[in-house]
Image (cartoon, rainbow, N blue to C red):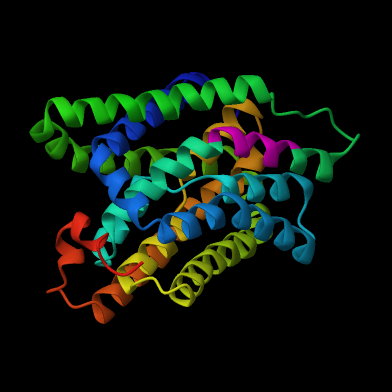
Amino acid sequence: MESGPLISIGLPISLFIIMIGIGMTLTAREFHQVTVKPTGLIIGSVAQILVMPLIAFALCWLLSLPPAIAVGLVIIAACPGGTTSNLFTLLARGNVALSIVLTVCASLITVMTLPIFANYALQLYFGAEREIVLPFGRTVAMLSAIVLLPVMIGMGIRAWQPRLAHRAEGVVSIFGGLVLAVLVVALVYGIRDRFLELMAQAGPSAILLNLLGVGLGLLCSRACGLSRPQALAVATELGIKNGTLGLMVTLTLLHSSEMSVPSAIYGVLMFPIGFLLAAYGRRVIPSTKKSADTPAAGLTEAG
């Protein structure tokens, strides 16, 4: 699945639309509410931006992953959450506002951190064997164009036409899921001759990365005194990644189908884990809790 019009043009445009959808779920007021009690935001952001890539490096070493799979695993680990994480947080009766702000903050910060981790992984696992470099300036510019700009556009639409933004949220979430599904199917077809081999190499590491992220989010959040809705929001953000962004980096910037395999496999496997999280949240958090119904109320809980 080399870079063609579908990947080089269609994928960035699709991601641009998805990020507008994330922006339409956010208001300046929600940023303010989170900064009043920022414990959840700090824990989630540090774990998302720093700890998850370090876990990926550890898994690459423990499992002795092939270079391309290792780089791909680090890239998906360095990716932020996406609209799907916000949806699963809602289903789990978690703190939706915290989930949204974590998604946006991580998306903005990873514009700078994702190229750093990716290039370090390329140097570590390929060394002098292959001249593969993720161009830092170009990557920052592209991520800014498809992350920063559309989020601001989405927030502008939300402020200007809140009813339109509310109606569009669900459509954009469905669109994001369809884009990821199409990409995964196309990727599997493109590597069909080596699919089982690559699945055996990338599958266990993708599952472990997902489970470790969810476990880290739940344990650290509760240990730091966050409420269950807040802990579920953090855990979901760490477990439900923006697989579309991982595919864009590996396919359009690195032009590597093999490196994109961990993002594709992770993008599929994260859904069963997300539904398990949702079932857990609905079992331990009563539906009468205001945090389950109103995102703003959830932010006022102990944090």
> Is residue 112 covered in magenta?
yes
Q: Quadrant of the N terminus?
A: top right
> Is residue 252 covered in magenta?
no
Q: Is residue 10 visible?
A: yes
Q: Residue furthest left?
A: 163
Query: To which quarter of the image does residue 115 belong?
Result: top right
Pick the front one: 233 or 134: 233
Residue 32 placement, left or right of 205:
left
Query: In the picture shown, does residue 271 fall above or below 212?
Result: above
Residue 277 placement, left or right of 288:
right
Q: Residue at x 15, y 62 (%)?
A: 293
Q: Residue at x 42, y 66 (%)?
A: 273
Residue 14 placement, left or right of 46:
left
Q: Main secondary structure of the magenta part?
A: helix
Q: Quadrant of the C terminus?
A: bottom left
Where does residue 36 sit, x and y in percent of width and height? 33, 53
Q: Residue at x 58, y 25 (%)?
A: 140
Counting the numbered discs, the total is: 0
Query: To which quarter of the image does residue 113 belong?
Result: top right
Q: Residue furthest front?
A: 36
Q: Residue furthest right?
A: 128
Query: In the picture shown, does residue 79 fall above or below 236?
Result: above
Query: In the picture shown, does residue 199 fall above or below 165?
Result: below
Where does residue 35 sit, x and y in percent of width and height? 36, 50
Q: Residue at x 28, y 52 (%)?
A: 97
Where does residue 29 sit, x and y in percent of width and height? 24, 42
Magenta region, residue range: 111-119
Where does residue 194 sit, x and y in percent of width and height? 66, 48
Q: Residue furthest bottom?
A: 284
Q: Is residue 1 visible?
A: no
